[in-house]
Every structure is written in C-alpha cells, then in structure tokens.
C-alpha cells in the first residue's frame, strides 16, 4: 500500500539495507542508531527503505526472535515509521509479525519543501530482482537454493549486462548499477530515495541510501565500501551522512 503525505515542513530520516539475519549484518549498530541517534534528529518520519532484514536462506522466525528489541523499538514509533519491503524481506509486505503492528509497503510518497519525493527500495528497477513473487519465495527458501540463485545472478549479469566490471576510479560503479540508476532516473518524476545497491550517492535525480553491512551480500555491486549511511531531508534539502 502506498501512502501520500503532503507537508512542506516535513523532516525525514532514512536508512536501507541492514540485512539483519545475514553474516554481514551489524545489528547492534542499527539498534544503537535507532534508539540513540534517531531521537536527536527530531524527524516527522523515519523510513526504513527495504532489506532491513534478510530472510534469504535463513529462518524467518529465528531472525525475528533474535531481534525482538529492534522490532519493538520500531513498533513503538507508530506512524512515524515507514517500513518498505526489499527483495530480501519482501515477505513482510503481506505477512504480519505476531504481536506487532508493523506493516511493510512497496513505496512511500511525500513532500518536503517545494520537492516531491518517492522512497522505494530499488529492486523494482533491477531486472534481476524485480519479481515480487520470486523475492517472496526466496524469503522462504533454504540456503542451498539461495546459493544457486546467486550463481544464476552471476550468469545472468554476464549474459545480459556483459561482464561485471569496474568503470572509472572516480565512480567505481559497474555496468549493472549504471543501468539500474538510469532506470531510476527515467522511471520517476519525483526525487527518488532508494537503496538496493549498497552504494551511497546523491545526484539531481536521486539519493542512494547506501547500507549498514560489512560487505554487500552476494557481491552484486562493485564499490559498496561506505560505512553506515543515513539520509536526512529537511525543507526539501537532502543530506547524506555517515553514522
């Protein structure tokens, strides 16, 4: 479900791609940010823009039970929290968490200053990951099946995009990311806040939120070396920060 909020004074903070449940997750850092840093930012909305959890090849109930403190902190935010589904936790878009009122959605539209924004995870612009049905099934898959999928990704990328390669030293982006970014630019009239690639970046068309992982799961994109990134939007101005 998509919510539209029109408020020129809206102040927003956002993170993406914590992948809690994976080996690369830094869940204590995420919890510290949410409990200690976020309250100081005095935002109207806090957007968790997908892949906050990672259910691919893991047990969903175990991931959730091991992160009950974070989940309850999120739940206590009420309507201040906007939770979006990513390809690694897409099942949360139609599955409720027992005892909590958390509901993940596809995207979120809002206004800040004189600008219109759209928050979305970003797999919707990546041909490899855009199938909602497959993403949901992978949230229930065992680790062997997920490993096979990553191998498929490598073959698909080589065949469809050409060999993944590092481009200029200044951008450090690969061909796949370049194509996904172009889809973000062409497919939206609003300013887009997205994640998915784990590569933080601000342009005239979008801000990529980066990630909160030690490494990019699956190594899908080159250049994901930034730290724990978050974005603040205030009166239409976009700022990317490192925690």
Image (spheres, helix red, strand yellow):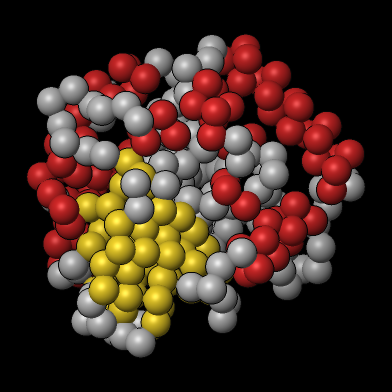
On the picture, is 231 further left or further right than 225?
A: left
Front one among 26 and 188:
188
Instruction: Identify the residue shown where x is 54% and y is 23%.
Output: 138
Q: Quadrant of residue 185?
A: bottom right
The answer to whether residue 22 is visible is no
Instruction: Identify the residue shown where x is 70% and y is 65%.
Output: 182
Image coordinates of residue 190 in percent, x first then y, are 48, 73
Instruction: Identify the residue shown where x is 32% and y is 17%.
Output: 62
- 241 versus 144 height, above or below: below
The answer to whether residue 59 is visible is yes
Q: How many marks?
A: 0
Instruction: Identify the residue shown where x is 26% and y is 39%.
Output: 103
On the picture, is 226 further left or further right than 116?
A: right
Front one among 106 and 143:
106
Q: Which residue extends farthest bottom?
A: 114
Image coordinates of residue 148 in percent, x first then y, are 70, 19
Front one among 94 and 135:
94
Image coordinates of residue 239 in percent, x first then y, are 40, 76
Image coordinates of residue 152 in percent, x first then y, are 76, 27
On the picture, is 51 further left or further right than 243?
A: right
The quadrant in which the C terminus is found is bottom left
Q: Quadrant of residue 80?
A: bottom left
- 232 versus 2 height, above or below: below
- 157 versus 149 height, above or below: below
């Amino acid at each position: 479900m998509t919510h539209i909020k029109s408020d020129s004074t809206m102040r927003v903070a956002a993170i993406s791609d914590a992948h809690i449940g994976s080996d690369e997750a830094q869940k204590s850092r995420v919890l510290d940010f949410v409990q200690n840093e976020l309250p100081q930012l005095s935002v109207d909305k806090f957007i968790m823009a997908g892949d906050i959890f990672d259910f691919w090849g893991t047990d969903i109930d175990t991931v959730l039970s091991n992160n009950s403190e974070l989940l309850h902190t999120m739940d206590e935010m009420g309507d201040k929290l906007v939770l979006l589904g990513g390809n690694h936790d897409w099942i949360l878009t139609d599955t409720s968490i027992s005892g909590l009122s958390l509901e993940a959605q596809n995207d979120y539209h809002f206004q800040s200053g004189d600008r219109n924004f759209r928050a979305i995870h970003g797999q919707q612009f990546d041909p490899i990951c855009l199938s909602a049905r497959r993403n949901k099934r992978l949230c229930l898959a065992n680790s062997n099946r997920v490993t096979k999928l990553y191998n498929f990704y490598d073959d698909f990328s080589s065949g469809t995009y050409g060999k993944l390669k590092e481009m200029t030293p200044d951008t450090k982006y690969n061909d796949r990311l370049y194509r996904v970014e172009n889809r973000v630019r062409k497919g939206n009239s609003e300013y887009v806040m997205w994640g998915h690639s784990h590569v933080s970046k601000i342009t005239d068309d979008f801000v990529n939120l980066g990630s909160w992982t030690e490494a990019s799961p699956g190594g899908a994109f080159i250049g994901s070396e930034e730290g724990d990134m978050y974005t603040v939007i205030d009166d239409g101005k976009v700022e990317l920060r490192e925690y």
